[in-house]
Image (tube, helix red, strand yellow):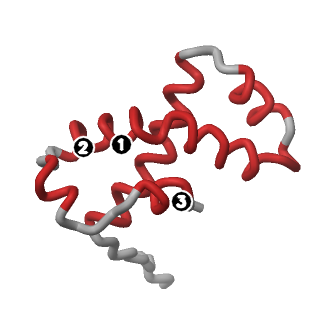
Amino acid sequence: MATKSTSLVRMTKRRKAKMKVSSAAIQIAKEHNDPLYKKYKALRKKYFNYKKKLVKKYGSKAMQRVRKSMGMAVRSWESSNLTNNDNILLF
């Protein structure tokens, strides 16, 4: 009888937020029909390069969306010492 194994990945709130910023930036680019998004989807070889550009371009809007979705207050976010440079290096 095989047992079902599960894996549990523990993440801090900060790490989870960094992951969501990247996803939110891509989602915003898709909503705006950004040409970089089309290249991002089409060219798999340059995937991470385009992703970095999209996060750089939409990082601040994505940060606002993540704050709202996670219910994080601005003060608690700023006190976590997360800088704008951290937002770009998400992958």
Q: Is residue 49 left or right of residue 60?
A: right
Gap in Å between the C-alphas at discs 2 and 3? 16 Å
* Mark 2 burial class by Cα count in 10 Å: few <14, some 14-19, many 20+: some
Residue 63's disc is 1
Disc 3 residue type (three-letter): Leu
Specify which label sits upstream in the sequence, 2 or 3.
2
Q: Residues within 10 Å of mark 1 (few under 14, many from 20)?
A: many
Whole-percent x, y for residue 69 in the image: 24, 39
Residue at image coords 41%, 76%: 6
Q: What element does badge 1 sit on?
A: helix
Q: What number is the disc on residue 90?
A: 3
Question: In the rendered structure, are the residues bearing label 1 and label 2 in contact, judged by CB atoms less than 8 Å apart?
Answer: yes
Q: Name which residue lies at 43% across and 46% down.
A: 21
> In this orientation, which residue lies closer to the viewer: 39 or 60?
60
Circle 2 sits on which residue?
A: 67
Side of 10 where 42 appears, left or right: right
* Front residue of 49 and 84: 84
Q: Give left or right: position of 37 versus 21.
A: right
Tell me the distance, in whole angstroms, between the alpha carbons under discs 1 and 2: 6 Å
Splitting the image into 4 quarters, where does residue 15 fall?
bottom left
